[in-house]
Image (cartoon, grey):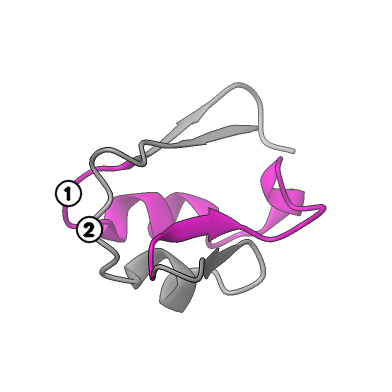
Amino acid sequence: MDIHIDTDVCIGAGQCALAAPGVFTQDDDGFSALLPGREDGGGDPMLREAARACPVGAIKLSGPPG
């Protein structure tokens, strides 16, 4: 699965990291980032929930599940 984080839209709410801590983290500025090696989601069952939890819709998922 392809994961795109729109860094121009992200407000650093951290809901993605709370929902799927095995995929998302927050960078030094507090904005959403992917954990190294998890660029495809790693098959995390909470990936879609993390994208839905983003209050500003900064996370887009596309392609088949990884």
Point out the residue furthest to the right here.
Answer: 37
Residue 39 position (above or below residue 20): above
User: Is residue 60 found left or right of 58 in the rendered image?
Assistant: right
Residue 49 falls within the magenta-colored stretch: yes
Q: Which residue is mark 2?
A: 11
Q: Position of residue 49 (x, y in %)?
A: 40, 58
Q: Assign a secondary structure to mark 2.
A: loop
Look at label 2 and name its amino acid: Ile
Residue 29 x %, y %: 40, 68
Q: Position of residue 22 (x, y in %)?
A: 67, 70
Marks 1 and 2 in Cβ contact (< 8 Å): yes
Q: Residue at x 44, y 59 (%)?
A: 32
Amino acid tagged 1: Val
Residue lying furthest top in this view?
Answer: 63
Q: Residues within 10 Å of mark 1 (few under 14, many from 20)?
A: some
Residue ID for mark 1: 56
What SS does tag 1 mark?
A: loop
Q: Residue at x 61, y 59 (%)?
A: 45
* Picture residue at 30% right of the left edge, 42% below the top: 58
Residue count near mark 2 (Cα–Cα under 10 Å), binned few <14, some 14–19, many ≥20: some
What quarter of the picture does the C terminus occupy?
Answer: top right
**Residue situated in front as seen by the camera: 42 or 35:** 35
Q: Earlier in the sequence, mark 1 or mark 2?
A: 2
Q: What residue range appears in magenta? A: 30-58
Q: Is residue 63 left or right of residue 29?
A: right
Image point (41%, 64%), residue name: 16
